[in-house]
Amino acid sequence: MRCRWTGALLVALSVVACAGDSPTAPTGPTDDSTNVVTITASGVSPRKIQIRVGERVLFINNDSVVHEMSSDLHPSHLACPVINLVGSISPGQSKETGNFVTVQTCTYHDHLDAQNPGLLGSIVIME
Ligand SMILES: [Cu+2]
């Protein structure tokens, strides 16, 4: 009888432990697994991305040259400074913006190729 009780207790404990380890629902403000902009030789994709307040955007450079993603307007970069945290990205590298905290639309460009229309994009920050 004593063994049975111990077994039952262990089962109960492991259930509690598993419940504690289970991941919480992905509703946090920084769940930005889909907030990804990829840069290739043909430009940024998607050109327009929608995110929520508090989230960030990850830029991935899949091109063979360095890019420097910067907030508009060029060259002051003052419209959405959190984009400037991305800065210079080497080929194969990925970098994140800061948190977008205002409901607005932010536009950006590649500071190293500011006139290239393929490298102009926008980030729509929603409530
Ligand atoms: Cu610029």
Image (spheres, rainbow, N blue to C red):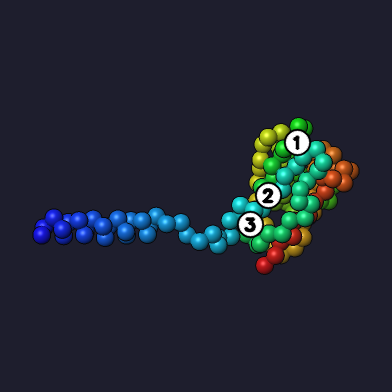
Q: Residue furthest bottom?
A: 127
Q: Quadrant of the C terminus?
A: bottom right
Give, as a three-letter code, the residue at label 2.
Val
The answer to which of marks 1 and 2 sits earlier in the sequence is 2
Residue at the spot of label 3: 55
Residue at the spot of label 1: 63
Q: Position of residue 60 (x, y in %)?
A: 69, 42
Inter-mark Cα distance, 2 to 3: 11 Å
Inter-mark Cα distance, 1 to 3: 25 Å
Q: Position of residue 65 (x, y in %)?
A: 77, 32
Residue at (54%, 59%) from the top-left corner?
26
Q: Residue furthest right?
A: 115
Left/right placement of residue 78 relative to residue 9 reads right
* Above or below, 17 relative to 42: below
Whether label 1 lies within 8 Å of ligand 1 gets the answer no
Residue at (64%, 53%) from the top-left corner?
34
Q: Which mark is residue 36?
A: 2
Inter-mark Cα distance, 1 to 2: 15 Å
Indicate the secondary structure of the residue bearing disc 2: strand
